[in-house]
Amino acid sequence: LLLLYDVTNKTSFDNTRAWLGEINEYAQDDVVIMLIGNKADSGPDRVVQYEDGERLAKEYGVAFMETSAKTGINVELAFMAVARELKHRQSCQQDQESKFNVKEYVRQESTKSKSSGTCCG
């Protein structure tokens, strides 16, 4: 489940807390959740800082990253990270307490891209 907020709109960020509460209450225990701050390219229009999103994600124990639908920054990576976690859970049938580490995945993918010299690995 990808839960997005707009980094240029404080209300959209504030509303994610309520959504995360609803998800925690009603979703299956094994649902993969990623909180995403969109419009990361917004520059001076930004009102929600990266650290605010990261803090909220940690509070709820979910993955976090920022994206830009306009420029494409991290959009594919967000979907791939969630898809990989779902595949990993299915193949390993791991327990519900295991959380996926999007930062580690992003670091690995960034390293691959730099070493291969292509954007797609």
Image (cartoon, rainbow, N blue to C red):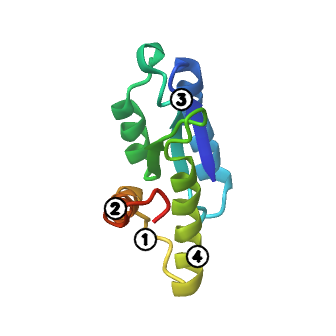
Q: Secondary structure at mark 4?
A: helix
Callout 1 crowding tier (Cα within 10 Å): few <14, some 14–19, many ≥20:
few
Asked whether the residues under the numbered discs 1 and 4 touch, taking CB atoms below 8 Å apart as contact, a structural biologist would say no
Label of residue 39 in the image = 3
User: Quick one: label 2 or label 4, which is nearer the N terminus?
Assistant: 4
Residue drawn at x 45%, y 52% as measured from the top left:
63
In the rendered image of this protein, does residue 107 appear above or below residue 46?
below
Amino acid type of the residue that numbered disc 3 sits on in the rendered structure:
Lys
Q: Position of residue 60 (x, y in %)?
A: 45, 47
Residue identifier under label 4: 87
Question: Residue 10 location, x and y as percent?
Answer: 52, 19
Q: Nearer the viewer, mark 1 or mark 4?
A: 4
Q: Position of residue 14 (x, y in %)?
A: 53, 25
Please name which of the two marks, 2 or 1, marks the residue nearer to the observer.
2
Tag 1: residue type?
A: Ser
Frontmost residue, 98 versus 40: 40
The residue carrying mark 1 is 98
Distance (Cα) linking label 2 and label 1: 14 Å
- Tell me the distance, in whole angstroms, between the alpha carbons under discs 1 and 4: 14 Å
Label 4 sits on what residue type? Lys
Q: Please tell me which residue is depicted at 34% across the width and 61% down the height of the picture.
A: 104
Which residue is situated farthest in the front direction here?
A: 117
Q: Which is more N-terminal, label 2 or label 3? A: 3
SS at badge 1? loop
Q: Nearer the viewer, residue 33 or 41?
A: 41
Q: At 48% from the left edge and 22% from the top edge, which residue is drawn? A: 42
Question: Which of 47/13 is in front?
Answer: 47
Decide: few, some or many residues near mark 3? Use Cα within 10 Å; few <14, some 14-19, many ≥20.
many
> Does 85 sit left or right of 99 as displayed?
right
The residue that appears at 43% across and 60% down in the rendered structure is: 118
Q: Is residue 57 above or below residue 96?
A: above
